[in-house]
Image: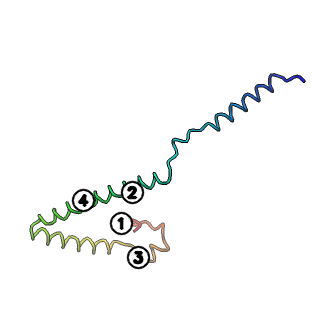
Amino acid sequence: MSFSGKFFNFIFLLLLTVSIASSGCRTSEVSREQVQELEKVDNQGQKALMKEYDDAVKKHHQMQSDNTKEMMKQRKKQQKQYNKTQQRSLWDRLFKRKCKTDYGNG
C-alpha cells in the first residue's frame, strides 16, 4: 500500500487546522460574576458623579440673587410654552411621520 505525497499533505494540513482550532486561549473570557462586579463598580461611580453634579447645581442656584431666580423661573415657563406651540399635532406625529416642518419632526 503506497501513500502519495498529496495524502500526507492533506493529513498534515488537517492536523494543523485541528490543533490551531482547539488550542484557543481561555484567559480572554470574562465570567458572569466579573461582569456583574464591573457593572456594580461602574454604577457606584456613576451615582457618585451624579450626586456631585446635583450638589453643584443646587449650590449654584442658591448663590443666585432673588431677581435672577425669578428671571430663570419666567424663562422656564416661556420655554415650556414655546415648545408646546412648536410641537406638531398628535395626528401628524402619529400618522404623518415623513412630514417635514421648520421646527423638526417633533
The nearer-to-camera label among 1 and 2 is 2
Disc 4 residue crowd, few under 14, some 14–19, many 20+, Cα 10 Å: few
- Measuring from the top left, give residue 43's x and y in whole percent: 36, 58
The residue that mark 2 highlights is: 40
As measured in the structure, the alpha-carbon distance from the residue carrying label 2 to the one carrying label 3 is 43 Å
Alpha-carbon span between mark 1 and mark 2: 41 Å
> Which part of the image, by quadrant, shows the C terminus?
bottom left
Q: Is residue 49 above or below residue 65?
A: above
Q: Name the residue under label 4.
A: 53
Label 3 close to label 1 by CB (< 8 Å): no
Q: As displayed, is residue 3 above or below residue 32?
A: above
Instruction: Give the mark nearer the N terminus: 3 vs 4.
Output: 4
Quadrant placement of the N terminus: top right
Label drawn at residue 103: 1
Find disc 3 in the rendering and name its residue: 89
| Horizontal side of residue 23 vs 48, given as left or right | right
Q: What residue type is labelled 1?
A: Tyr
Q: Where is residue 38 in the image (x, y as percent from the top left)?
A: 41, 52
Q: Residue furthest right?
A: 1
Q: Earlier in the sequence, mark 1 or mark 4?
A: 4
Nearest to the eye among marks 2 and 3: give it.
2
Q: What residue type is labelled 3?
A: Ser
The quarter holding residue 65 reads bottom left
Q: Do the residues labelled 1 and 4 touch (CB within 8 Å)?
A: no
Mark 4 residue type: Tyr
Q: Quick one: label 2 or label 3, which is nearer the N terminus?
A: 2
| Residue at screen point 18% across, 73% down | 74
Nearest to the eye among marks 2 and 4: give it: 2
